[in-house]
Amino acid sequence: MLDKQAMDVIILDLRKVTAIADFFVIGSGSVDVHVKAVVDHVERSLKSTRKPLRPLHTEGYNHLNWVLMDYGDVVVHMFQPDARAFYQLEKLWGDAPTEYVEEILPSA
């Protein structure tokens, strides 16, 4: 997600909170084109791994306000800022440990 400049990327560890998934990966894109670029990049990247992964289900790709990609144990949520603020998944799953993902800059 960070390769395409996704914003405010977090990982919620849901393993002790619910059985619906082990992790939610949540990020934001500034506009629909940005959300699409991030979602397409995630899908391409996971398909091109040694053991290719494909989403079991994808929702929201036609509207790009909130795209959900279900990989079974991991569910990726990519939002535009207004939708993320409205749905507040971080607060809904507030009991889950949260990891804030930041870009690791190469050392000079």
Image (spheres, rainbow, N blue to C red):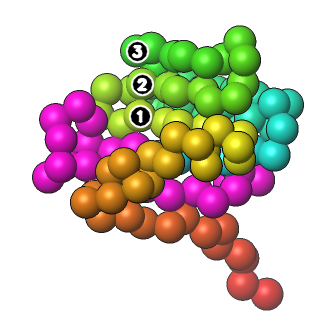
Secondary element at image label 2? strand
Secondary element at image label 3? loop
In this figure, what is the number of numbered marks?
3
Q: Can residue 37 be seen in this view?
A: no
**Disc 3: which residue:** 56
Q: Where does residue 26 sit, x and y in percent of width and height?
A: 52, 47
Position of residue 41 relative to residue 81, above or below, is: above
Q: What residue type is labelled 2?
A: Asp
Q: Give the label on residue 70, or none.
A: 2
Which residue is at the front of the view, 45 or 62?
62
Mark 1–mark 3 Cα distance, whole angstroms, equals 10 Å
Which residue is at the front of the view, 37 or 16?
16
The residue lying at 45 percent from left, 46 percent from top is 89
Q: Give the label on residue 75, or none.
A: 1
Which residue is at the front of the view, 53 or 99?
99
Q: Do the residues labelled 3 and 2 touch (CB within 8 Å)?
A: yes
Q: Is residue 17 magenta?
A: yes
Mark 2–mark 1 Cα distance, whole angstroms, equals 5 Å
The residue lying at 52 percent from left, 40 percent from top is 87
Q: Do the residues labelled 2 and 1 touch (CB within 8 Å)?
A: yes
Q: Does the magenta stretch include residue 83?
A: no
Position of residue 74 relative to residue 81, above or below, is: above
Q: Which amino acid does label 1 sit on?
A: Val
Q: Do the residues labelled 1 and 3 touch (CB within 8 Å)?
A: no
The residue positioned farthest toward the front in the image shown: 86
The residue lying at 72 percent from left, 17 percent from top is 63
Dividing the picture into quadrants, the one containing residue 105 is bottom right
From the viewer's perspective, tell me whether residue 12 is left or right of residue 82.
left
Segment colored magenta = 1-24
Mark 3–mark 2 Cα distance, whole angstroms, equals 6 Å
